[in-house]
Every structure is written in structure tokens, then in C-alpha cells.
């Protein structure tokens, strides 16, 4: 089964979010793309980044989606917000190696990037790469991720 992917951003990341949304719609690995905003023209266009990160995290926690790619100015705010949701592992990554390790080492369900940090073509490429990785539950990393899960008690 394909990935159910959330894309989201605050107003400082909306342009990159819209580009990754378009890419995801054309990506055969993606089963469903869920755009949680913000979107230009919406009354809530200026919704602060914590609402975006928390909403994405809760949807994954509740089983409504598998993964999320989120944007804000730096990528940091939406990552911090998503990480407040129990069981969610979100990482800001702007390089290929960190993007890979966020899944293979850390089993992150959420990737965040900053529209004010990297160019759009790099963001698109990193999003595409990230979607190609799957965590190996039989790997040596699994016991380390389990420490986080145990700490949260979920
Ligand atoms: C703009 O509100 C900016 O602070 C936000 O997009 C983000 O970079 C925060 O982490």
C-alpha cells in the first residue's frame, strides 16, 4: 500500500509546501496526499506554525496518515510542534544524509524544512528522497527508537 502523506506549512513555508504537494500528487509511491494548509486565500492563512505541526502529528498519531512533510521559515517550529505529540518523531533536515538517517536511524514520520533556508529544488529533491526510505524494524536502530517509545509510554 502506498504512503498517506500530509503536507503542511505556515505562511513562511507555503510556496514550498504547494510545490511538494504537486510533486506528491504525481508520485506513484503516494497513495493519498492530505493538504492541511495553510493556503493562500484562506481566512486562516496566518495560522501560526505550532497549529500546523500539532495537527499533522495528531493525524499521524490517530492513524489518519502515515507521514508528513512540513514547512515553515526554518523548519524548526513545525518540527518542535509535531514533536509535542506523543509518539511523533519529527526532524528538520536540509541535507541528503540527515534526510536518510531521519528514517533509517530515527524512524521519523515527519520531515520538516525551511523555505528561508534552502532552495526549492533542493527541498523537492530531499522530499523525494525521504519518501523512498523505510525504517527497518529489525535493524540495530530499532532498540534505540524503542527507548523513546518507552519513555513516552505509548
Ligand atoms: C515565521 O513565523 C517563522 O518564525 C516561522 O515560519 C518558523 O520559521 C518558526 O520556526
Image (cartoon, helix red, strand yellow):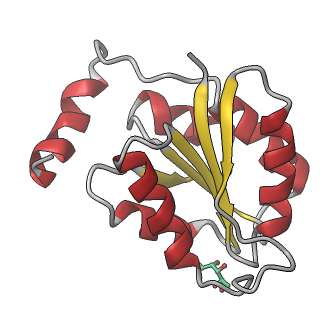
Q: Residue at x 31, y 18 (%)?
A: 137
Looking at the rendered structure, the number of numbered marks drawn on it comes to 0
Q: Taking 80 as reference, is 68 above or below it?
A: above
How far across and down, in percent of the image, does residue 45 sit? 74, 82
Q: Residue at x 42, y 23 (%)?
A: 135
How far across and down, in percent of the image, does residue 116 sit? 78, 72
Of residues 33 and 97, the one drawn nearer to the viewer in this rendering: 33
The image quadrant of residue 29 is top right
**Residue found at the very far top of the displayed protein:** 138
- Quadrant of ligand 1 in image: bottom right
Q: Taking 38 as reference, is 5 above or below it?
A: above
Of residues 31 and 122, the one drawn nearer to the viewer in this rendering: 31
- Left of 102 or right of it: where is 152? left
Quadrant in which the N terminus is drawn: top right
The image quadrant of residue 84 is bottom left
Q: Residue at x 87, y 57 (%)?
A: 119
How far across and down, in percent of the image, does residue 154 sit? 15, 46
- Left of 113 or right of it: where is 98? left
- Left of 109 or right of it: where is 86? left
Q: Residue at x 51, y 76 (%)?
A: 51
The image quadrant of residue 125 is top right
- Left of 48 or right of it: where is 148? left
How far across and down, in percent of the image, does residue 122 sit? 83, 46
Of residues 135 and 52, the one drawn nearer to the viewer in this rendering: 52
Amino acid at each position: 500500500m502506498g504512503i498517506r502523506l500530509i503536507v503542511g506549512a505556515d505562511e513562511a513555508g507555503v510556496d514550498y509546501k504547494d510545490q511538494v504537494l504537486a510533486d506528491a500528487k504525481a508520485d506513484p509511491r503516494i497513495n493519498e496526499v492530505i493538504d492541511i494548509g495553510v493556503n493562500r486565500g484562506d481566512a486562516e492563512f496566518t495560522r501560526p506554525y505550532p497549529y500546523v505541526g500539532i495537527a499533522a502529528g495528531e493525524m499521524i498519531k490517530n492513524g489518519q496518515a502515515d507521514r508528513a512533510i512540513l514547512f515553515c521559515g526554518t523548519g524548526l517550529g513545525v518540527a518542535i510542534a509535531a514533536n509535542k505529540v506523543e509518539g511523533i518523531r519529527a526532524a528538520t533536515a536540509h541535507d541528503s544524509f540527515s534526510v536518510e538517517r531521519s528514517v533509517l536511524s530515527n524512524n521519523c514520520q515527519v520531515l520538516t524544512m525551511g523555505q528561508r533556508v534552502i532552495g526549492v529544488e533542493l527541498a523537492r529533491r530531499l522530499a523525494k528522497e525521504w519518501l523512498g526510505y523505510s525504517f527497518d524494524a529489525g535493524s540495530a536502530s530499532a532498540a534505540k527508537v524503542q527507548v523513546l517509545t518507552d519513555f513516552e509510554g505509548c
